[in-house]
Image (spheres, grey):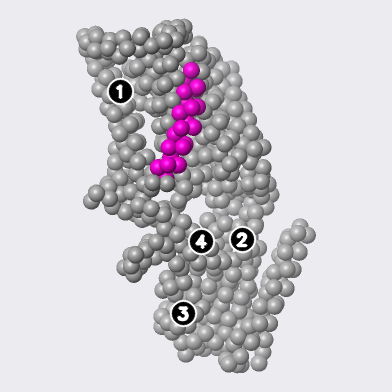
Amino acid sequence: MKAVSSQQSTVNSHKTEYRLRLLLVFVLISMLSALCPLLFADDASAELTISANHDHITIDFFYHGSTVSVSGTSDAGTDLIIKITAPDSHEALKQKGKAAGFLWMNLGTLKFENAPNLYSIHSTRKIEDILSREEMDKFVIGYPALNKHIEIIPVSNDEERTKWFSEFIRYKEESKLYASSSGQINTTNQTDKQTYYIKTDWPYQAPPGEYLVTVYAVKDHKVVEKAETKVIVEQGGIVKMLSGMAANNGAVYGIISIVIALGAGFGVGMVFRKGGGAH
Amino acid sequence: MYLYLPVALTSINILIPVGLGLVVGLLSGLFGVGGGFLMTPLLIMFGIPSTVAAATDSNQIVAASTSGTYAHWKVGNVDFKMGFHLLIGGFVGGLLGVQGIKILRAMGNADFVIKMAYVLMLGIVGTYMFIESLRSMRKKKVEEVKQRKESGIAGFLKLLPLQTHYEKSGVTHSALVPIVFGGFVGVLAAVMGVGGGFLMVPVMVYILRMPMHVVVGTSLFQILFNCIEVTFLQAYTNHNVDFILAVLLLLGSTVGAQVGAVFGRKLKGEQLKVILAVIVLVVTVKIIFELTLTPSLLLSQAGGH
């Protein structure tokens, strides 16, 4: 049995800090890769690779999202599912509803537990056609599986739960943080292998953090293999400096904000006065 | 061109905040309202998290009201004595209002109460201003009738202790009057999460009987100090003032406020009142729609006012 391998593209970064982090990620991925064959010991004779072309996204002053291409090779004749996700977290959202028959208002706060902030799923064919329900649930692949995975508090019955889950998906899709597609993955056949490739938009709404990209090889409605890589989103330059100061040195940050506002206000006042507007 | 906002954690087309700043700054210079009641919802509409929108808005109001205050002070339109008395009340009222919101939140449905407060206050203030200023623009007789009608309130105010003459405004009131009204507006401002200028202006015009141009300058002066305090508290305790967004808003609003102040001098007081009344009524109608029309998304960010 061949080992599942994972690669990372080289990153042109001048900072040693980035290099160290990358090294750490590489070691982590290698360890995960080493574990994968143990998990899939039953499904022998396959080779699945994955790499993300743009695995280190730096948020700078002019950042407006990015694109990430995911590519690799797999056994010929397997279907593929690519999942890009943030670690599970929890989110509290305001819930609107009708009161007194005609007034729309916030009726409370809904908590979404185990909900990844970003969830993007792409497959060669419709997921329902290539994967069994059990497997979808097991690997949290697709919105129905995510529905079972996410806990919504408080909901009193299944109907209410279904309603708020679909509202949650609509809310996330509107913010570009959730996406799903089928048939967007390009595959090219070579003798006993195939190469695959997909280019996805990386939303600027995704906050800094570590995102996991997983490719699942699917055959006979089962996941036969998976491989993972990471995309790291990090702040840099002025953005990093300012957000750090806002979080860790609120008093100084506040005073600077006020001084700049006063300065801008007076500055413009002076300019206009010189213009001879006043009487 | 897009810029990334380090605290809001989102990317925005630079023209959006600059344009918003310009429009809101113009209103600020014209009427002495900070524009918070317009700016915060607009920012949220353009994808800024509501907590960041509210906090950053206070920061931009500092700049908008600095240049506005400066412009009005240069032409002698700021009644500093009145401003200080209003500030004392506003500061105490603001503290009480924040506590009130905490209690409302604990009881649930704070948002509904806030929106209803908006509709009621804006609706009443807008309608009253609109009708009153239209009347006084058309007929002087009505003005006289109104003067007689208001003598009741005026008589009561005269009975209060600490009678003080406010030279700049040319009025004499008990110092308690601006302090109490300032406090009342402060409570509402905190509850509604705005500077309170759009409430304070009518109070100064109709109850304190101050001349319109002094009202605008004095209101700006009071708003400036309120917002300096709020900006600092937000940055210090909630870490949600977005520096870059504020600077972009300031670019627009400082220029807008100047243009507004220049136009304001050219317009008559009554015309100013009618325009402000129309704006207040439009906002009221918008909130009524918000309350009654089915929203496109049934979930929204938590936080904000």
Q: Is residue B186 above or below residue A22?
A: above
Are the residues flagged by discs 3 and 4 from a single subunit? yes
Residue A263 position, x and y percent, is: 62, 27
Residue B237 position, x and y percent, is: 58, 41
The CA span between labels 3 and 4 is: 22 Å
Residue annotated with mark 2: A209
- Circle nearer the N terminus (3, 2): 3
* Viewer-side residue, B53 vs B158: B158
Residue annotated with mark 4: A90
The CA span between labels 4 and 2 is: 15 Å
Residue B35 visible? The answer is no
Residue A6 position, x and y percent, is: 66, 78
Amino acid at circle 1: Met
The CA span between labels 4 and 1 is: 47 Å
- Circle nearer the N terminus (4, 2): 4
Name the disc covering residue B129, or none.
1
Are the residues flagged by discs 1 and 3 from a single subunit? no
Asked whether B102 falls inside the magenta stretch, the response is yes
The boundaries of the magenta stretch are: B85-105
Q: Tell me the residue at 44%/23% (across/down).
A: B182
Image quarter hosting the C terminus of chain B:
top left
The CA span between labels 1 and 2 is: 52 Å
Query: In this rendering, which labeled residue sits more in front, label 3 or label 4?
Result: 4
Amino acid at circle 3: Met
Are the residues flagged by discs 1 and 2 from a single subunit? no
